[in-house]
Structures are given as structure tokens and as C-alpha cells.
Image: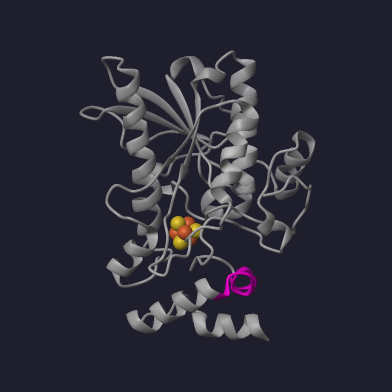
């Protein structure tokens, strides 16, 4: 965990964090989040740089509106592998906590109620997550976020469904699919028969990578040291959706974890990425 300003070439947080919270709709870049219309605003914080910028944007705007008391930070804990390696980058949780402490808002860590870890979920599934199999996100982030909204709703005991904002660090620059996402959108799990009305909010959607780092620099926001070691994204240390260059760098920094993943790759009989196996990634990392 470090505060040293750093500007990597580009980067993203978890490629899919809470993505299933949103459904396709037309972009609405100019939309303003209405704090008065919500009981609580939850910020999903993976400990990555986009999360840090998101926490800043949400808390700054909430404070200006006199609504900072409604903001809470949630870190979804992805647990450990069978051999005891954290699925996430060690220290990511602490960075997320530092974000909450900096802005003086409550911090919560929650894990899937069904799965002890993302590793357990992957092994149970018998194949790796992929672009068309985002069970990693839906089960260990989206469901956890939804449960936390319900938990806060029960705590507030309003006698009606809680109206929650759910802020995430997705940015248009990351992909065409993300560019098409609306900044504000009603969560599809909202509505009649549910305990919640959720508005997803992407407050840093229009920022580019340099602007995200500029926010960190100007406000002395904590960032994870993995960025200083050449990583461009955080969350899972081994993500099948990550660029191969990042995976090679991660394999250099996390050799034991990648050995365990490579053993699982052989055991499950499914290659980690279409383009490259974990064994090949490890070989690249050693060369
Ligand atoms: S494997 Fe991890 S980092 Fe990759 S998309 Fe799934 S939850 Fe996100």
C-alpha cells in the first residue's frame, strides 16, 4: 500500500465488477445523481485505481450536497485458494479501507454467502470464467453487493424498500461495451416484490486513465503498490480476461499462486485463456 504518485500507461480495475447490476440502455452522460432520492449510496471498492477515483467523486459530491452520511464503501472479499493464496492482490482490501478512512465513511467487507472463495467457485464450475461465463462476477461481486444493499435496507428499517445508489468504477475508455453503458440506470433487480430500488452510478465513466491518476495525485489517494510494479489492473491476480502482458507480470510477482492455478488448469482440462495457457504464461514470466 503506498501513496507515491505513479502513472502507468493504462489500466482497469476488475474487468467485470458488478457488471451484471446493469442492463443495456442508452448513454446518459450528463445525468446527475440525485442524493435526495436515495437512502444510501454504496461504493464498490476493489482497491484499484478506478475505485479510488470513484470513492473520491462520490464522497466529494455527497459532501457538497450535505449527504456524506449516506455513503458506505463495500469491498467484496474473494477469499483464498486451496493452498491459502489470496485470489486478490494482498493489500487490496487495506487500500479500499484507506479510501473509506480518508473520506470518513463506513467501510464493510463482505464475501459470498454461497462460496467460500472465488477459487472454490471456479473449481466447482470446472472451467475458468470467460467473456461469456462471468459467473465470477455475478456470484462473488454482484450477489454480494445485492445482499449488502438488503443488509443496509434491513438496518435502516424504513418500512419500504431501501432506495440505494450503487457506484462503480467502470470507464468508457476500457471497452466499447463499457462506453455504451449509461452513467445512471435502474438496477434490474429493483422493483415490485423486491426489497430494494437500486440505481447504478458510474461517476468516473468519462475519465481517462491519466485523469484517474491525476485525481489520486491531487488528493493524495492511496493506491496499490502492484501498479508501481508494472500492473495495469488489480482485483484477481490471475484473471482469464486480463491482457497476457499483465498476466506475465503478475506471474513474475506471484509465482506460487500461478503454480497452483496451472495445476488446476491441468486438472480441469481447460486452458486458462483461449490464446495462452497458464504454463505458457509462467514460461514467459521466467524468460
Ligand atoms: S476473474 Fe476476477 S478480475 Fe477477472 S473478471 Fe472475474 S472477478 Fe473480475
**Horizontal placement of 178 versus 25: left or right?**
right
Q: Give the range drawn in magenta.
A: 244-255
Q: Residue at x 44, y 49 (%)?
A: 77
Q: Does the magenta stretch include residue 246?
A: yes
**Horizontal placement of 239 versus 264: left or right?**
right
The extreme front residue here reads 84
- Residue 93 point in image, percent of width and height: 54, 47
Task: Say which of 188 and 28 sits in front.
Answer: 188
Among the 4 quarters of the image, the one containing residue 287: bottom right
- Residue 4 point in image, percent of width and height: 78, 48
Among the 4 quarters of the image, the one containing residue 143: top left
Q: Residue at x 42, y 81 (%)?
A: 263
Among the 4 quarters of the image, the one containing residue 251: bottom right
Task: Say which of 249 and 104 sits in front.
Answer: 104
Task: Say which of 69 and 193 sits in front.
Answer: 69
Question: On screen, 97 above or below 12?
Answer: above
Question: On screen, 148 above or below 209?
Answer: above
Task: Say which of 152 and 271 sits in front.
Answer: 152
- Residue 278 point in image, percent of width and height: 50, 79
Q: Is residue 260 magenta?
A: no
Question: On screen, 273 above or below 75?
Answer: below
Question: On screen, 217 above or below 229?
Answer: above
Amino acid at each position: 500500500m503506498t501513496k507515491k504518485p505513479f502513472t502507468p500507461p493504462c489500466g482497469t480495475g476488475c474487468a467485470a465488477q458488478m457488471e451484471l447490476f446493469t442492463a443495456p440502455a442508452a448513454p446518459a452522460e450528463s445525468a446527475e445523481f440525485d442524493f435526495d432520492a436515495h437512502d444510501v449510496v454504496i461504493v464498490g471498492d476493489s482497491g484499484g485505481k478506478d475505485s479510488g477515483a470513484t470513492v473520491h467523486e462520490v464522497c466529494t459530491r455527497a459532501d457538497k450536497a450535505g449527504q456524506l452520511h449516506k455513503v458506505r464503501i463495500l469491498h467484496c472479499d474473494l477469499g483464498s485458494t486451496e493452498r491459502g493464496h489470496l485470489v486478490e492482490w494482498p493489500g487490496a482490501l487495506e487500500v479500499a479501507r484507506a479510501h473509506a478512512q480518508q473520506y470518513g465513511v463506513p467501510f464493510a467487507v463482505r464475501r459470498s454467502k454461497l462460496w467460500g472463495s472465488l477459487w472454490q467457485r471456479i473449481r466447482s464450475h470446472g472451467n475458468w470464467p470467460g467473456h461469456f461465463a462471468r459467473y465470477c462476477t455475478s456470484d462473488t461481486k454482484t450477489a454480494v453487493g445485492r445482499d449488502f444493499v438488503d443488509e443496509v435496507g434491513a438496518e435502516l428499517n424504513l418500512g419500504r424498500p431501501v432506495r440505494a445508489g450503487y457506484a462503480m468504477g467502470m470507464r468508457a475508455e476500457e471497452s466499447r461495451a463499457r462506453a455504451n453503458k449509461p452513467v445512471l440506470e435502474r438496477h434490474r433487480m429493483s422493483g415490485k416484490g423486491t426489497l430494494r430500488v437500486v440505481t447504478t452510478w458510474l461517476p468516473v465513466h468519462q475519465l481517462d486513465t491519466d485523469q484517474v491518476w491525476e485525481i489520486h495525485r491531487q488528493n493524495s489517494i492511496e493506491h496499490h503498490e502492484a501498479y508501481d510494479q508494472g500492473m495495469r489492473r488489480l482485483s484477481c491476480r490471475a484473471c482469464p480476461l486480463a491482457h497476457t502482458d499483465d498476466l506475465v507480470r503478475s506471474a513474475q510477482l506471484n509465482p506460487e499462486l500461478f503454480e497452483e492455478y496451472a495445476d488446476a488448469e491441468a486438472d480441469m482440462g481447460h486452458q486458462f485463456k483461449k490464446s495462452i495457457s497458464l504454463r505458457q504464461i509462467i514460461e514467459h514470466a521466467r524468460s
